[in-house]
Structures are given as C-alpha cells and as structure tokens.
Amino acid sequence: MKLDGLTFPDDRLYAPEHSLWLREEPDGQITLGLSDYGVALYGAIFAFTPKRVGLRIEAGRSFGVVEFAKAAAAAKSPLAGVVSAHNPQLEKRPALIHLDPYGEGWMIRLTPNDWPAARAGLLAGEHAVAAFEKQAECDGFDPDDTSVQAYRRGG
C-alpha cells in the first residue's frame, strides 16, 4: 500500500504514532523498524544507538536513540518486552535504516510481554495507511518538501 509515494508492505503491522513497523517472527519475537513515513519525516539517519540486549522496556518507552540530520530522537516501542537483539549492521551502516527500512534496516527484536494484547493495538492494511495520513497531518508533514525526504524512494 502507498501514501504520497511512501510504501507500507501488507505483511507488517504498524504503530503510526511511533512511525514504526512490526513483524512477528516464527520464534515469537517481534522485529521493529522505522516505516517509510518515519524515514521521510526524519530524513538522513546518521546513527542508531539501541538499548542493550536483555533490557526490559515498557510500552511507550525508548528502545534506542536515532540521530538524524538536525536532531536526535528516542525511538519508542509500542509494546512492552525484553530486547532480544539489535541489528549489528546498523553500527557501521546506520544508513540501512533509510535505504532499506523494511529489510536490512530493521532496528531491534523484542520478546514481547503480552503479544496478543499489544497486537490488538497495532494497525494493518488500509487502517494503517489512514492512520499514517492522520499522523502526517498532526506532524505537519509535507510530502512535497524534499528537504526532509532525501532518501524517499518514490513511486
């Protein structure tokens, strides 16, 4: 699915208020990454510093810090759990977050506390795209402002 040229793969769940995508792995872990909207909103990403493996985080709390062109921001998790892995490639190539956000640019994996309850609060499909559209309004996001979308993969 697409919104203003941004892609939202159907095989993911989304937390638009956090600009994140989530994917359940076969082993029950949850992989999180920055959505195409987040990439377009923040622009070039220069560093990602994740919380350490084994650390318990609560929903709405930071799982790491993303440094981009003009600032840094806490990446906040939409679910509670224990950090089970972080993407080791991002230490040397943080640009993977904006170059391949739905693939090699994944950020962390969590072992969730209560996945069924957390999953109920996430969105998919057209509901996710509609929520990202509302989030874009709240953020004052301008899809034609190329200054914050240096790595936008149009189409």
Image (cartoon, helix red, strand yellow):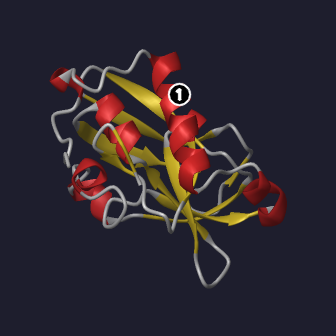
Foreground residue among 101 and 91: 101
Horizontal relation, residue 1 to residue 63: left or right = left
Horizontal relation, residue 90 to residue 112: left or right = left
Mark 1 neighbour class, 10 Å CA radius: few under 14, some 14 to 19, many 20 or more: some
Residue at x 23% of width, y 25% of height: 148
Horizontal relation, residue 4 to residue 29: left or right = left
Residue at x 21% of width, y 41% of height: 152
Check disc 1 and give the amino acid type.
Gln
Residue at x 81% of width, y 64% of height: 116
Foreground residue among 30 and 66: 30
Give the answer, above or below, for where 116 lies relative to 138: below
Give the answer, above or below, for where 99 lies relative to 137: below
Where does residue 142 sit, x and y in percent of width and height? 31, 20
Element under disc 1:
helix
Give the answer, above or below, for where 144 lies relative to 132: above
Where does residue 43 sit, x and y in percent of width and height? 25, 32
Where does residue 3 sit, x and y in percent of width and height? 38, 41
Read off the residue under disc 1.
135
Would residue 75 be visible to someone looking at this image? no
Q: Quadrant of the N terminus?
A: bottom left
Where does residue 22 sit, x and y in percent of width and height? 55, 59
User: Which residue extends farthest bottom?
Assistant: 26
Give the answer, above or below, for where 30 lies relative to 100: below
Residue at x 78% of width, y 55% of height: 120
